[in-house]
């Protein structure tokens, strides 16, 4: 677990406006998406909470959308497919799980994961995991065609290197070794 102040300081490495990140964190805690702490006690955030904060900051063009964007973007499915309960375990169920796995692999030293990028599209709900080998994985809302733009106009996205997120996690939660198999 990491204290909120430490998380805010670590997330500064991603280049977001620190005041905005703090406001987004407050909105998420008020909405119950991340822990709120208590009287005279700073909240302890888990690795999943830190990912929720990063997703909210990267995908919310307006502050008031922070808590809803976490739900929307975390629930995106691979290529907009409807994932049944009988799907193989190797198929990621949603974007939040896939990002957590990618970051964990990068923390364990996987070179391909460390050189991958996360693209958070704000023009419409989409997350793209872009590894260096070119096998791009798009996460869209269930039933959406991932091969087409969802709207007319420009595609606006925030791109974050997976290695940067992995380094933040290492600084906050300690380094993982390949044998650790730690949880993200």
Image: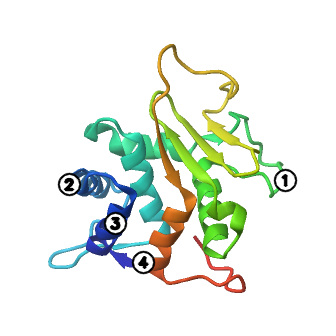
Could you tell me if the residues under marks 1 and 2 are in contact, i.e. CB atoms within 8 Å?
no
- Mark 3 and mark 1 lie on one chain; the one further toward the N terminus is 3
> Which residue is denoted by mark 2 in the rendering?
19
Q: Please, is residue 166 above or below residue 60 in the view? A: below
Left or right of 91 on screen, residue 182: left
* For discs 3 and 2, the disc positioned in front in the rendered view: 2
Percent position (x, y) of residue 89?
A: 80, 58
Percent position (x, y) of residue 145?
A: 69, 24
User: Badge 2 local density, few (<14 within 10 Å), some, or many (20+)?
Assistant: few
Q: Quadrant of residue 114?
A: bottom right
Residue 18, numbered circle: none
The residue at the point 77 percent across, 48 percent down is 85
Which of 112 and 67 lies nearest the eye of the viewer? Answer: 112
Spatial CA span between label 4 and label 3: 16 Å
- Mark 2 and mark 4 lie on one chain; the one further toward the N terminus is 2
> Which residue is denoted by mark 1 in the rendering?
88
**Coloration of the structure image:** rainbow
- Mark 3 and mark 2 lie on one chain; the one further toward the N terminus is 2
Spatial CA span between label 2 and label 4: 20 Å
- Mark 4 and mark 3 lie on one chain; the one further toward the N terminus is 3
Spatial CA span between label 1 and label 4: 33 Å
> Which residue is denoted by mark 3 in the rendering?
35
Could you tell me if the residues under marks 1 and 4 are in contact, i.e. CB atoms within 8 Å?
no
The residue at the point 21 percent across, 73 percent down is 38
Could you tell me if the residues under marks 4 and 3 are in contact, i.e. CB atoms within 8 Å?
no
Left or right of 25 on screen, residue 124: right
Spatial CA span between label 1 and label 2: 42 Å
Percent position (x, y) of residue 174?
A: 49, 84
> Which residue is denoted by mark 4 in the rendering?
172
Percent position (x, y) of residue 84?
A: 77, 43
Outermost top residue? 152
């Amino acid at each position: 677990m990491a204290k909120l102040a430490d998380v805010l300081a670590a997330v500064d490495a991603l280049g977001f406006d620190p005041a905005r990140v703090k406001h987004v964190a407050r909105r998420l805690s008020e909405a119950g998406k991340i822990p709120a702490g208590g009287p005279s006690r700073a909240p302890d955030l888990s690795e999943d909470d830190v990912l929720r904060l990063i997703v909210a900051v990267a995908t919310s063009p307006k502050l008031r959308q922070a808590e809803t964007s976490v739900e929307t973007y975390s629930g995106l499915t691979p290529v907009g497919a409807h994932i049944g309960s009988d799907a193989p375990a190797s198929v990621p169920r949603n974007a939040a799980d896939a990002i957590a796995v990618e970051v964990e692999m990068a923390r364990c030293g996987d070179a391909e994961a460390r050189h991958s990028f996360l693209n958070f599209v704000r023009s419409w709900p989409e997350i793209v995991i872009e590894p260096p080998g070119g096998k791009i994985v798009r996460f869209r809302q269930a039933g959406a065609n991932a091969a087409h733009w969802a709207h007319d106009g420009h595609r606006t996205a925030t791109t974050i290197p997976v290695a940067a997120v992995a380094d933040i996690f290492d600084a906050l939660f300690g380094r993982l070794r390949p044998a650790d198999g730690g949880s993200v």
